Amino acid sequence: MKLNKFSNIDSKTIAQVADEYGTPLYLYDEALIKKRCHDCLQMQNAFGLTVRYAMKANSNRTILRLINDMGLHMDASSLNEVIRAELAGIPLDRIMLTTQEVYSGAEMEKLKGLLKGGLKYNICSLRQLELIIDFAVKTGIFPGIRVHPGIGSGESATRNTGDDYACFGVHLTDIDEAVNSASDRGIKFEHIHVHIGSGADSDMWRQNIDLELAIISKHFPDATRVSFGGGLKEARMTDEKSADLKLLARYAKERIEAFYEKTGRKLHMEIEPGTYIVANSGYAVTRIADKKHTSRSNFIITDGGMEINSRPLLYGSRHPIYNVSADGSRVISSEFNKNNSTTGYRAVVAGKCCESGDCQTLAPEGHSVPRAMVEPGIGDITVIGGTGAYCSSMSPFNYNSHTQVPEVLYTENGHLVLIRKRQSLEQVLENEI
């Protein structure tokens, strides 16, 4: 029995992976990752398209290789991410670094070496420009620039990277200074980048297209490439709506064509999806260890919680929940099961960490919210959906001295392949002195 209508993974596979590798663990659907990559690469465009995967979403080596093999380039947010992608076999000329980091000493020398090897670099502050400008003049390797537009959108306030409460990129009030400083040294900004936030509203994403083209028209006469960033909305829950990729692509194409008609300048388009590519491919597989109740709520206690998915605690994010029988013979209840609400049973899905916030069912303001479901038993399996993005790469897995959990790929031909081993306690402690 499939978990949901989108999944290639069924309840038998869930029980098998839990028995074979132990819980908790992450399980990824290779076929769905490939489909999302293909969908992005098929986007309409006016004068060329580059799709860069935002590797901060999930940077497992196997996932990076899979996405690279599909034809996507990489969007890195740190020097270590660049090195990580290179170690995965991804050519430097397929990687763009856009970061808050400011380099000096050995790190700056490492950056310069990577740039000579083909790495692309967006400056995000006047300070970053100041530090790289002599190198750029000497080598002719010019950086791009990330613009802070002053408006943005995101799934939550903390995921909005474009408004004036965030500090990503060179703010519009500093653009002229950046352009003049670069121009005085013979540097041209050819790659212009704006990212307004993660989980951005589609209307705001379209507005960003118009805004960025206006900025290019006013400030960047040498621009040849425009990046609209990522943040494409991917629905995890049944009552959410994903971004319509075809409509957004058509709009971007029309606006870039109109820009060409007005200016005679052809712009190559780039996007940087992360969540859209991997979020719904991932499942956190846990086992029910205990059940409790208070005067207010029933609680299901699983062996994996905030240390494998901190998004509900951080953002108030909602994830689909599936309960599977211990032997995998059936899906007991799921977000797609209309009988969930007819049983009268509701429960909060909690983890084992010593935090009241260790719940997978939290309201944005922080308190736990029970979900309607068919009551599962101890030993049954609880699966948290939508955990392919910003879970393994971001969660506090060593909190309470828990160990990082394994990651498994469910391949297109139906095999389970271990792509990260379970961390040992010795590995958690090995750098302590």
Image (spheres, rainbow, N blue to C red):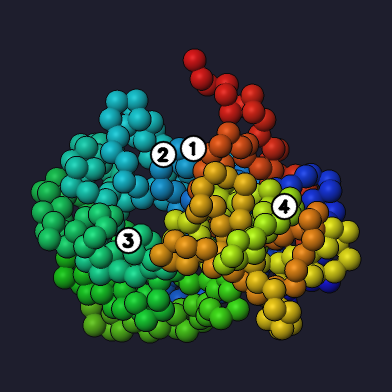
Seen in the picture, residue 94 relative to 318 is either above or below; the reply is: above
Q: Which amino acid lies under the numbered mark 2 shown in the image of this protein?
A: Leu
Q: Secondary structure at mark 4?
A: strand
Mark 4 or mark 2: whose residue is earlier in sequence: 2
Q: Which residue is mark 4?
A: 290
Q: Which residue is mark 3?
A: 161
Q: Which residue is mark 1?
A: 83
Q: Which residue is mark 2?
A: 79
Comparing 170 with 41, the one in front is 170
Q: How much space separates mark 4 and mark 3, taking CA atoms?
A: 40 Å
Quadrant for the N terminus in the image: bottom right
Q: Residue at x 37, y 81 (%)?
A: 203
Q: Quadrant of residue 250?
A: bottom left
Q: How much space separates mark 3 and mark 2, taking CA atoms?
A: 20 Å
The answer to whether the residue labelled 1 contacts the one labelled 2, judged by CB atoms less than 8 Å apart, is yes
Q: Position of residue 390 (x, y in %)?
A: 52, 54
Q: Residue at x 47, y 84 (%)?
A: 247
Q: Residue at x 60, y 78 (%)?
A: 238
Q: How much space separates mark 1 and mark 2, taking CA atoms?
A: 6 Å
How busy is the neighbourhood of tag 3: few (under 14 within 10 Å), some, or many (20 plus)?
Answer: many
